Amino acid sequence: MKHWFICLWLLGGFALAEPRAENLIGNLAGRTTISLDGTWNSIVDPYETGMGSRYYLNAKPRDKSELVEYDFDASEKLQVPGDWNTQRASLLFYENPLWYQRYFSYHHRPGTRAFIYFGAANYQARVWLNGKKIGEHTGGFTPFNFDASAELVEGDNSLVVEVNNTRTKDGVPTLNTDWWNYGGLTRGVTLVEVPETFIRNYSVQLARGSTDKIAGWVQFDGRAAAREVTIEIPQAQIKQTIPVNAEGRAVFNFAARLALWSPENPKLYRVILSGGGDTVADEIGFRIIETRGTQILLNGKPIFLRGISQHEEAPFRGGRAFSEEDARTLLGWARDLGCNFVRLAHYPHNETTIRMADRMGLLIWSEIPVYWNIAWDNASTLENAEEQLRDMIARDQNRAAVILWSLSNETPIEPARTEFLKSLATYARELDATRLITSALNHTDSSAAGVRSLNDPAGQYLDVLGLNEYLGWYEGRTEDADHLQWKTAYDKPLIVSEFGADALYNRHGDAQTRYTEEYQANLFEHQINMLRKIPSLAGMSPWVLMDFRSPRRPLPGIQDFHNRKGLISDRGQRKQAFYVLQKYYRELSESGK
């Protein structure tokens, strides 16, 4: 199976292979970097004329008669990181190409290479440095980097990026979603400087099923071969030197006595890797996550996941969340709710959020945007999904907080889809055997009166079953939950990954009136009573922490293009249902769950 997606484009009648993203550099925070964030020039390109006009050259007229029909320097500005939709009112619904440009100064140090690293660009990005194309990337929520060493010049450089958020039928996600299609350079852009031979990436984790052995690998990149790598954890008195093979890879497994990471004790150790003239330091927690029958075990003990689902939507200001302040606010609200677990839906969220969860002791479900009904029979769609899965894992494989890799959300049951998810599950386990695999499923049937069964065939490929159900909102009445029993076809843990109801903050009425806080709170009461009776229930992540924008939700005066299922408004106001769930989570916590 191929795991690289090579695009072709036509220029002057010749088909040329596009430069592609390099294997991801792990742990950006541990590298020598120059931030390229800040104010960028921008040109909106609704008719896609930028390629024909060669915007990537950032040309200036050489004399008064030369025709150049664009000027980045005189164009409007955008802040990076940031989506373009919320920076200008005229771009709120914009879906098409937009060109970014900025200047930066660079002074080369002998014996080094330089990469340009993008935290994310939604959805397709093409990148030019000083008029030369250095790469392109497809996928709106995963990081990517390009080797820029050959194109950098001493002194001033010009970086141009075309970002296109047009939705496509064969994309991941596809044409229809229930969140805002924020376009642009939504996460940071960084120049990374590394030695000519450097540590590209690594995995340093507890061996599967073990609390006293560390296992993993280190991958070097460069022409000169590194002979060995040293792994140090000073606080645990660990120092191991491992040989590196001809492919630049070291694989290890050694004994270690460590304090285990948990929500109650989110212990992080300073881990130092050195070899081949490079040194990288990281903060890593060590824990094991397993299943036993219908239980999820953290460090060998059963744990109930008291969770909430969350979109990457910025509180207060709106738009795509990206900052440490955003992460601290959103995850802080989850902790106030009583959570030990957050489902990050429906795509990989920014690395700042993941690292904040590591420090705060919040367990994480991380998902790729295989959402609803995509092109299951399209080989390039599967390849794209695999790339996004690969890069999500490559970025976050050393974060103790991440316990679940999710393959999909609410996909239809059909043979091609099930094979698609089977392929993703196999690939995920090849990349990372230390975490659990899940998906949010939503197709159930009634095997008997008052009984609902989850028997999705994709469940056989998962470690943990996710279930989205909206009893009392999209089907039935809230009271129907009181008499409903749930069963699954698999002896596996079940997380009810979504349930909920829309409510506009401060809209009041009786418990039967939709869009009121009372209706939402009443639904949560009945749902909690129902969930208490599910014997295989190992956790829950109701929908959703905070209201978020969605073009599917136009109801004037109530939704106004927002999904209002948040327990908190987008202005930080807590609804009645917040306190209903908080009370339940406190009861669970006090009972030892």
Image (spheres, rainbow, N blue to C red):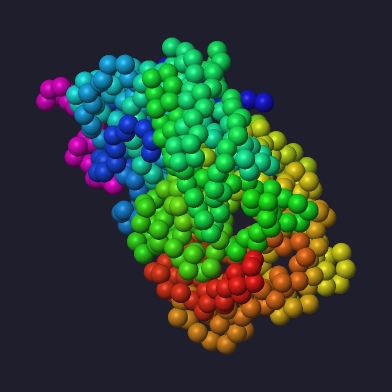
Furthest toward the front, the residue is: 237
Looking at the image, is 345 positioned above or below residue 38?
below
Position above or below: 492 against 286: below
User: On the picture, is 284 further left or further right than 403?
Assistant: left
Q: How many marks?
A: 0
Direction bottom: furthest residue: 510
Region of the chain picked out in magenta, as a range? 58-79
Looking at this rendering, what residue extends furthest in the left direction?
Answer: 64
Q: Which quadrant does the N terminus fall into?
A: top right
Q: Quadrant of residue 488?
A: bottom right
- Can you tell which quarter of the image residue 485 is in? bottom right
Tell me where residue 525 appears, x and y as whole percent: 64, 78
Tell me: residue 182, above or below residue 473.
above
Question: Where is residue 144 shown, x and y percent of the image?
Answer: 45, 33
Q: Residue at x 37, y 53 (%)?
A: 324
**Residue 572, quarter of the rendered image:** bottom left
Q: Residue at x 38, y 38 (%)?
A: 29
Q: Is residue 419 left or right of residue 120?
A: right
One can see residue 360 in this view: yes
Q: Which residue is most to the right?
A: 448
Q: Residue at x 60, y 64 (%)?
A: 306
As drawn, 62 above or below 419: above
Q: Is residue 70 magenta?
A: yes
Relative to the observer, which residue lies in front, 466 or 103? 466
Q: Which SS type dominates the magenta stretch? A: loop
Q: Nearer the viewer, residue 173 or 361?
A: 361
The location of residue 534, given as percent across then percent down, is 76, 67
